[in-house]
Image (cartoon, grey):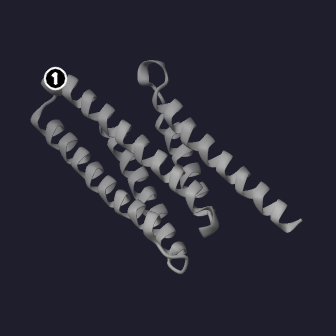
Amino acid sequence: MEIRTLAFSARALALGALLAASALCVAADTPGGKATAKDVSKKAGETGRAIKDYTVLQRDEALKQAKAALDDVDARIRRMERKLDSEWDKMDQVARRKSRAALNALRRERGELAEWYGGLKHSSAESWEQVKAGFVKSYEVLKESFAKARKGF
């Protein structure tokens, strides 16, 4: 009975995590690319919470969710780069400098998130909670940086 409950809980968590990731992608790819920062922030928060709730026994599902989050971050950075490129000639020097700095910060924080992802892949059962918490914290920092960068674009 307890195993059945655990299996159901694992499936429910995995489904919730996948829905959160797909909602992030959908929000970012709405017609005209006009997802609100609030929508993206909400979905990113759900993703972070979903990963935080995984146990070491659910490592594979957590890794799938974390990889989806990294892929989404990469896509969002590419969209911001394209937007910056298309508006470059219309920007003054200060706006260019701020935009470059924001993108560089996002790339740096994305790199840190990827390091935590590697830790998730290779962590022992004993270090799982610590590494998972590091990934979630890094993801939250990146989420906040996206919100700040979005205001600047």
Residue at the spot 48% in from the left edge and 30% down from the top edge: 35
Residue 84 left/right relative to 120:
left
The spot of residue 139 in percent (x, y) is 44, 56
Q: How many marks?
A: 1
- Relative height, residue 35 to residue 145 (above, below): above
In the picture as drawn, the residue positioned furthest to the left comes out as 93
In the picture as drawn, the residue positioned furthest to the right comes out as 1
- Give the quarter of the image for residue 54: bottom right
Q: Identity of the amino acid at label 1?
A: Lys
- Relative height, residue 60 to residue 150 (above, below): below
Residue 93 left/right relative to 34:
left
Residue at the spot 59% in from the left edge and 50% down from the top edge: 46
Residue 60 left/right relative to 152:
right
- Give the quarter of the image for residue 15: top right
Residue hosting label 1: 90
Residue at the spot 56% in from the left edge and 44% down from the top edge: 42
> 69 and 83: which one is in front?
69
> 133 and 6: which one is in front?
6
The spot of residue 137 in percent (x, y) is 45, 64
The secondary element bearing badge 1 is classed as helix
- Give the quarter of the image for residue 62: bottom right
Residue 26 left/right relative to 90:
right
Residue 153 in view (yes/no) = no
The spot of residue 91 in percent (x, y) is 16, 28
> 45 and 4: which one is in front?
4
Residue 35 in view (yes/no) = yes
The spot of residue 60 in percent (x, y) is 56, 57
Considering the image in quadrants, where does the C terminus appear? top left
Considering the image in quadrants, where does the N terminus appear? bottom right
Label 1 CA crowd tier, 10 Å (few <14, some 14–19, many 20+): few
Residue at the spot 30% in from the left edge and 35% down from the top edge: 78
In the picture as drawn, the residue positioned furthest to the bottom comes out as 126
